[in-house]
Image: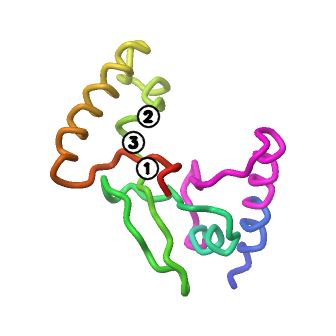
Amino acid sequence: MPANCGGEREHIRRAVESLRRLTGERPFGWYCRYAPSENTRRLVVEEGGFLYDSDAYNDDLPYWVQVGDKPHLVIPYNLDLNDGKFATAPGYGSADDFAKTLIESFDVLYEEGAGAARSLFDRHAL
């Protein structure tokens, strides 16, 4: 095991506990805001309570990977449809701009979804 695994494992444990304390339940998904390490996905799977992680930007659709002997769901993070564009220029000018983008994107994905799965994800569907 690489030397930094213990520290990362502890950070994951502390994050889970903090969110459990604040919200009354543990998180079901994991996303490393600032780039996962080469060990992150394995550590998330070993932690045992996550249904998925979003530490990927490589696809529009969720997909399964094998982590050790366990299947693990990856739901790629969407850089287009999130509120991060409020923080960087030339992002959204208003909440209405953001809402319009979300609604129009939903409408397109809903229409496309009639023939194939799209990347509209509901964690409660797992």
Please name the residue that numbered disc 2 is placed on.
82
Mark 2 crowd level (few <14, some 14–19, many ≥20, 10 Å Cα): few
| Residue reaching furthest to the right | 21
Q: Are marks 2 and 3 in contact (CB under 8 Å)?
A: yes
Q: Position of residue 26 (x, y in %)?
A: 72, 51
Q: Are marks 1 and 2 in contact (CB under 8 Å)?
A: yes
Q: Position of residue 40 (x, y in %)?
A: 60, 68
Amino acid marked by disc 1: Tyr
Identify whether 90 is placed above or below 123: above
| SS at mark 2 in the image | loop
Amino acid marked by disc 2: Asn
What residue appears at the point 52 percent right and 49 percent down from the top-left corner? Answer: 124
Q: How far apart, in angstroms, are the residues tagged by discs 1 and 2?
A: 9 Å
Front in this rendered view, residue 33 or 17: 17
Identify whether 27 is placed above or below 81: below
Left or right relative to 21: residue 118? left
| SS at mark 1 in the image | loop
> In which quarter of the view is residue 35 placed?
bottom right
Q: Are marks 3 and 1 in contact (CB under 8 Å)?
A: yes
Q: How far apart, in angstroms, are the residues tagged by discs 2 and 3?
A: 6 Å
Please name the residue that numbered disc 1 is placed on.
77
Is residue 32 located in the magenta-colored stretch of the structure? yes
Q: Quadrant of the N terminus?
A: bottom right
Front in this rendered view, residue 85 or 97: 97
Magenta stretch in the rendered image: 12-39
Is residue 31 located in the magenta-colored stretch of the structure? yes
What residue appears at the point 84 percent right and 44 percent down from the top-left corner? Answer: 21
Q: How far apart, in angstroms, are the residues tagged by discs 3 and 1?
A: 6 Å
Please name the residue that numbered disc 3 is placed on.
79
Left or right relative to 114: residue 91? right
